[in-house]
Every structure is written in C-alpha cells, then in structure tokens.
Image (cartoon, rainbow, N blue to C red):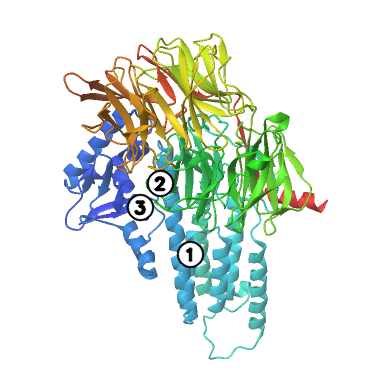
Amino acid sequence: MLILELLGTLSLRNETRPVPLAAQQKRPLGLLAILSLGGRQGVSRDRIEAYLWPESSGARAHHALDQTVYAIRQALGSDLLLSTARELRLNSELVRVDVWEFEQAIRASQWTVAVGHYKGPLLDGFHFADSHELESWIETNRTRLRLEYQKALEFLANLAAEASNHSQSVAWLRRLANSDPLSAGATKKLMRALAAAGDRAGAVQHARLYQELVRQALEMEPDAEIADLAAALSRHAITEAAAPRHRSAAPDNPSVTPSVAASTPGVKGRSRRDRTVLYAVIALAILVSGTAIWGWMRPAPAKQVVRYTLAIDSSEAMVPSTGWSGRVAISPDGSRLAYFGGPRSRLLIRTRNELHAIAVPGTEGATSPFFSPDGRQVGFLRDFIVQIASLDGGPPITVLDSLTGVSGASWGPDNFIYADAFSDLKGLVCVEAKPGAGPRWFTTLDTARGEIDHAWPDVLPNGKGVLFTVRFRGKNGAKGRISHAIAVADIPSGKHRVIVKDAMYARYASSGHLLYVTANKTLMVVPFDQNSMKVTGEPTALTQGMRLGLGGSADLAVSGTGTLVYATGVGRGDQELVWVTRDGKTQPVDPDWPGSYLGFPALSPDGKWLAVARVVVDESFSIWIKRLDRGPSIKLTLDGNDNYGPVWTPDGRSVTFLSTLATGATDLWTKRADGGAQAVMQLHEKWNLSNPRWSPDGQWLIFQTDIASPGSGDILAIRPGIDTAPVPVVATTFTEMSPALSPDGRWLAYISNETGEDAIYVVPFPNTGTARWAISGGAGTEPLWSHRGNELFYRDGSGNLVAVAVNTNPIFSLGRSTALFSAAGFTSFRFTPQYAVAPDDQRFLMIRPLETSTDKLIVVENWFEELRAKSRK
C-alpha cells in the first residue's frame, strides 16, 4: 500500500519497499498531489494541463501529461491511476492519502484522529512557481484544511476544559495558537486556558510574545483586549504573590510576579521555548504579509478608508464589457473577487492575498458572477443556463437550463437563486440552488405602466425582498424611449413597487444603504431600511464616470464587511463586427459601424450584404441591411416591436425575420432587402419563435419553438402557400434547437439535449426519422454548414470553433474534426448561431465587444467608515 502525505512536507512512501526515484520527481509528485486534492472523483485532464503546464500549447500539454502518467505507472504500477478520456483519479484501493483520512475523521467527528493526521500546512514548502492557478488552488485548500484543523483543536480544548483537565486544554490551545500565531482570538483562548490551569504568569508572558510578534511582523498595534487581559491577570498574580503561602502549596506553581517568575528555572525554560516557537514564525508571517496586494491582510488600526486601482496582470485582464451582462462579484466576507477575464473568457477567482487569479474550469464564455451567502460557491450565467461551482474544486453544476438570461442573478439566504429571464416582456425567475430544481416566475411585469423587463436582482440579506432594475418603454420612458428605475419585490409573493427613479443596478450595503447608478453614469448611495424595504433618506453622489451598459449593466459590488468594488470607463458595452480567419486572426469589418447590440448575423448568398439585428443607443431591436465591408446601410424595420433573427431568402432579394409582440407572441415576416415593399407575414404564433431557415429551393421555412412552449423546444416547418399550420420536423420530449440545412437541402443539423448536455446531430431532410448521426461527440452548439457542404462548423464546450469534415456521397459519413480557434471572446448564443460563414469558407463573420479605453477597477476598503463619518456631519 502506498502512503501519500500532503499535510506538512510532501511525502510518498511504500509500506513494504522503497519508492522508485522516478516517482519522487517534482512533476509526478505534483500530479499525485493534484489528484489527491481532487478527491475520489478525480480531476479533469484539461484542468491538470492548465495547472502543470500553463505556458504550453494544448498539444504539448497533452503530451507532457501522457508522459508523466506513463512514468508514474511504470514506477508505481499501472493500476494506481484510473483514467477516462476526460479525467484522471487515484485508485483508493492502492493508496492512502492523509488528506482523505483527515477529512473523513472530521466528517465523523473523530477530532483526536483528525488532529493526529495534521502534521503541518498542506504541501508545506512545495511550490509550483510557474503556475499561478495551481498555487492559488492549493492555497485555497490549505486554508480550508487549516480551518478544519483549528476547529477540531477548539472542540478538543473545550471538551478538556469541561472535564476540568486544564493542562490538556492548554496543550490543545497551544497547538491552535502555533497554527495561527497572529490570531488574537487564539491568543486570548490560550491565555484564559493558562489562567484556568493556574499559570497566569505564563498567560501574561504569551501575551507579550504575541504583542511583539504582531508589531514586528505586521507593523501595527495588537488587539487592545490582549493588553487588558494581560493586565488583569498580572494584577491577580501580584495579589496572590503577596498573600501568605502554605507549605503544602505546589513548589512549581508559577503564581508570582514576572520578575520572580523569570528567576524560576522551570518557568524560565518554558518562556524560552515559547519565544523560540513564536519567533520562528515571524519570517513566515512577514513573507505572507508581503505577498498581499490588496492590503486586506493588514487592516489599519483605525480602519482608515483606502482607495486604489486594482492592478490586474494582462493575461488575466477583464473581458470587455457588454451592455447586457455583468463581470464582477465579491464574496460576502470580502476575501475573494470573482470576475470574467483572460484570453478564454473564464471565471477567475482572486483572493485577497494573491497576485494572480485562479480560473474556474468549464466557465468559458459565461458571464454575470454571483456568490452564495456563505461565500463557498460562485454562480454564473449563460443564455438559458444557471450554473454554480464550488470554490473547493470540481466541475460546474447546472441548476437550470431554461428561462434565464444573462442580466444578473442573486443567491438568497433561502437558498433560492433569483435571476433575469431570457427575453423581454418577462419578470424575474427563481429556482432552488440544486440540480434539477423546478423554476417559477417570481415577478410579473406591470405592462400598464410600460414595464418591459426586470433585471439585475439583488436579494436582501434578511431574505424579505429582492431589489432589481425595471426597464420602461413608451410614454413612461425618457424621451419616449427607454428609462429605468429600481424596484423591490416581496418574498415570496413577488409583488413589487418602484423605490428609486432614473436608477439602475441596485446593490444593498449592510451598513443600511442602497447603491445604484444613474443614466448619467453617477454612482449614488441612499439610506435604506431592509426591514421596511423603504428609502429612509436623501441620496448622495459618490463618483462619476461609472461603466454603464445599454441594458443597465454595471460593474459594482460591495461585501458585507465594507469593501466596495466598482469599474469606471467610457464604454457602454458596444459591439463590433469582425472577420476571423480559420487560424483565428481578426480584422474589423467597419470600425465606424458599431452597435449597442449586434446579433444574428446573416450573409446574403453572394456574400456582399449583411442582415443583422442591431440596437443603436436606446432604440428597440431592429433589422439592418449593410453593404460589406464599409458600404452604406439601411434600417429595414421600424421602432416598436423587437425584430431579430434575420435570414436571407434563397434568391438573395428579401430577408425573413422575427418580430416579438407586447403579448409575447411572435410574427414571422419577409421583406425586400432594399425596403422597396411592405413586409409579408409568413406565420403568427402565440409562443416565441427563433432561428428561421429557408431550404435552398425555397419550399420549406424551418424554425424552432421556445423552450417554454409545449414540447420544451421543437423544430417545426411550414411550406408557404401549402401548409396552414406548422408541421413537426424534429420534435421529442427533449429540447431541439438551432436547425441548419445543408447547401443541397438533403441534411439537417440541429442541437438536442437528450444526453443531458447540448450536442449536435445530423438527420436526413425532410425524412428526419430514417437515420441520425452524432456530430460533436460531446458538448456543441451553433451548427452551420460550409457553402460547399463538405464541412460542418460548431462551437464545442470549451468555446472553440470546430470544423468537422463531412462526406455525403454515396452515404453520409464523418471525417476529421479540427478545432480552428478559440471563439470564447466572441458573442455566442446557445440557441442560434452568432456568426456567419463567408462564401469561400475561409472566414467567419463574428461579433465581439468593442475595445474602448481600459476600464479601471476601483477598490475602496473600509467604505462603511466613510459612510459613518458622513452621517455624523
């Protein structure tokens, strides 16, 4: 049996024979340590490669991991590592891991056994200097295990004290103080235990050593309660020393003044040992303090308000802002910042004492992070999907895969997540934070007052209500268009009322205030009572120049401990069109033609014209026709309804598009691309529709139904002039979406979630029930055919654009699959492709956030102190 020890110095040994040197090298040991921390469920290969070979390309990292696995198996046996195509794990029948045994003892409340396993901090002295992500992940686990160890020590010390075994209580608390020598709480506990054991002088001496350590290591004055407690114990010791002593008293009882105690050999020896232990950690404490960059490891004695711009490494820079989604969140205790960034647009977690962030695997292309109330999990959004991930590791868990949008979510103390709905004309959705939970509508739009959307929820800490942004259109809108206000909804009824006008992105501060952003990008604060859910004072401006998107998005977060984080910037989250080559090189289409929103791009058959859904400033969604690249453009649809999803007719003369009505119904229209004739209605449905597609011969018009409609999303079709009602093309109990017809009209690609994840399939058309082929071999969305019909493009689960070779003669078959480039930084949408393929199949027209001046992320520590100072004036 192999024994792997991670607590303290990393050690690998065998109960019966020496361990080969090949298995004791840094990379094999590092891999074994990672798999141990991953637990019995294992760790994904992608995550291991990112940890151990962060600077290597995918192919090099794959090879290096395979070589390391081979070396371990050669040295320790082929059965030690169990593997699948995606994961690696340790065989728990062949190896004992002290971390596993420690955690098992903690779960079983076997406190003595647990502390026996803890021989020091996790992987003490073992470093991966070239992997910031791995170091951060190890530090997170190191902190978690140390806290469990300290809890066990406290429990054992309390048990001993209750049994009047004060010497044993002191022993446990000495270990507690040594594990965190800068902790005022641990020091006070040990002092009281020493006093209870009759060693008041020892308690006073420990207080002085602690005070000296804090002054040298942290350059600050120690907790005043330590000095008060030491003074009280000193006075008591002097009183006892002055009293007559009986001869029967224990001769080594150190109840004397410090000067007398210092001359006592037994006490003097113990004092030196205490000093040796505490001074040994001074260098370590200084080193740890020196790595902290936010200053949160070292709070100022007077809790001074400190403002600064947070420095972020260029490789971890925040993704460009968008008008409809958020980027940042802060944990309730202020110890972690979550944001989306890096070249793969992943969720990054940056702790207060680290220079670099750690990426959460499986979060590419997601957005709008939010923390659980206990700060141990973080949630994030995709179109129609709510996911959560544990900060202790493990893959993301899908809570909900329908109804939700990307404009914010909040996790309440009732363990429900309150989230933005996908489409306008809907209220907020709520769902319990567990897999497979059923969602329900939480708020309802007041359409009589012009409400068209509810977004950016923030649950009050007392669980009584939810703050959110209301969007208005029409007579209540500024300049007859769009305006915003902050409302609060009661839990559980969902009934809401407006509390602040001309306001967006509300965030509650536990100091009893409400933060929000105005249309002129001013950050405001106003007193707010969460119990009555009413504004109780006058608003005050905090700063100007906030980053504010068209859909009310902002980068604003405040922790329960008073750390404020916000971003300033001139950008509104505009987007631009770009050409992307097969090797990932980009070129803007027309820098002078951005949009507050761009989506559903469609190229004309000759590739010279573009039809796209576009929003300019605060207008509604409209269909625009543009000559490529830098030619003129026209607005094809009028303001009013939201128009989206354009597709060209096979002859290239007209565009078919969707129009959403105020009732939630959808019309399908066709209109000449030059605007020279009135639009012709193709279909009216009471449900939302999307993704219209014409067959090449113009005989079929295919589309998909909304996942909230009967059937949970099906692919239907009509033959204009023949069918009086849509006919099913692919319709099951699962969700089918994103239909794409091959250039010859014989094959239909689409997405189905029947396996539990979105995957791409191809069926014959129109006889779709005769055969089927799986294309993506895993997660895949947004399928499109090449113009020659010999390739099928899609996005995989990691955000890459993939090309699959296809052969349709004499029978359908698949060839090689190639990941062309990472598309994580470009707009994506689960249900409809957000890119178009050029006629030569060598370029892709894609959408990305428009780069403007770099946003600044501002941190304000101890911000509540500033509010208190203002309230006293």
Along the horizontal axis of the image, is 357 left or right of 231?
left
Per the model, the C-alpha gap separating discs 3 and 2 is 37 Å
From the image, tell me which residue sits under label 2: 398
Along the horizontal axis of the image, is 282 left or right of 215?
left
Q: Which mark is residue 64?
A: none
| Tag 3 secondary structure | loop
- Label 3: few (<14), some or many (≥20) within 10 Å? some
Q: Residue at x 54, y 14 (%)?
A: 677
Along the horizontal axis of the image, is 546 left or right of 425?
right
Marks 1,2: beta carbons within 8 A? no
> As shown in the figure, which amino acid type bears the numbered disc 2?
Thr
Q: Which mark is residue 176?
A: 1
Q: Earlier in the sequence, mark 1 or mark 3?
A: 3
From the image, tell me which residue sits under label 3: 9
> As shown in the figure, which amino acid type bears the numbered disc 1?
Leu
| For discs 3 and 2, the disc positioned in front in the rendered view | 2
Q: Nearer the viewer, residue 562 or 552?
A: 552
> As shown in the figure, which amino acid type bears the numbered disc 3?
Thr
Q: Residue at x 24, y 53 (%)?
A: 13
Quadrant location of the N terminus in the rendered image: bottom left
Residue 87: horizontal and vertical position, in percent?
Answer: 28, 43
| For discs 1 and 2, the disc positioned in front in the rendered view | 2
- Label 1: few (<14), some or many (≥20) within 10 Å? many
Residue 97: horizontal and vertical position, in percent?
Answer: 29, 56
